[in-house]
Amino acid sequence: MLEYKGSAPKREQIDSWKDEETVRNFLAVLNIILLLIILVIVLNWLYTKIMVKRSAKVIKEDEFAENMRKAQVIDVRDRSAFDAGHILGARNVSYPMMKQNPSSFRKDQPIYLYDQVMSLSVRAANLLRKQGYTDVYILKGGINAWTGKTKVNKK
């Protein structure tokens, strides 16, 4: 708080008031930026939750493993991640490839999607929903949560 003590303020005191005001302004701008970043993160999380509910059903590992023999199991990660380790019986159709040719799946069988942690799977499920696929499932937690059999492609 600025105080007036009866005499004219000294030059050093005026400079310190300007410095304090500059710091306060900087901190106010920084707080606004941080709040905007937090808002963007929350909105992205909310958007993802809504897309999951609209596009696919998220299932746990046991249900995924139990029914995967009757489904098309698709790994939507890129080829190098797929080769490094994938669920046994899965085929690799990366998300960018799926965007180019989304009609390469059968509509009479359920589609089981997975990736590293569900981020690409949600986008892939939304893409499939737009193409008319209705029986789409996503592995909760992605391959990171998978404890079943996996395969590594050796080069």
Image (tube, grey):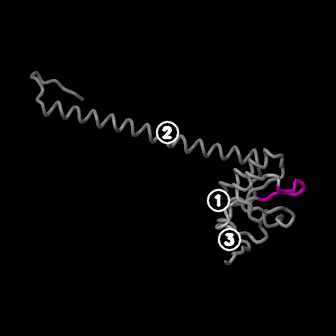
Of residues 107 and 64, which is closer to you in this image? Answer: 107
| Relative height, residue 128 to residue 17 (above, below) | below
Q: Which residues are magenta?
A: 104-112
| Disc 1/disc 3 C-alpha distance (Å) | 17 Å
Amino acid on which disc 1 is placed = Val
Q: Is residue 134 left or right of residue 53?
A: right
Which mark is first along the chain, 3 or 2? 2
What residue is pinned by disc 1?
117
Q: Is residue 150 left or right of residue 35?
A: right
Which mark is first along the chain, 1 or 2? 2
- Label 3: how many Cα within 10 Å (few below 14, some 14–19, many 20+): some
Q: Residue at x 23, y 36 (%)?
A: 19
Q: Position of residue 34 (x, y in %)?
A: 45, 42
- Label 2: how many Cα within 10 Å (few below 14, some 14–19, many 20+): few
Q: Residue furthest top?
A: 6
What residue is pinned by disc 2?
36
What residue is pinned by disc 3?
83
| Relative height, residue 23 to residue 135 (above, below) | above
Secondary structure category for the residue under label 2:
helix
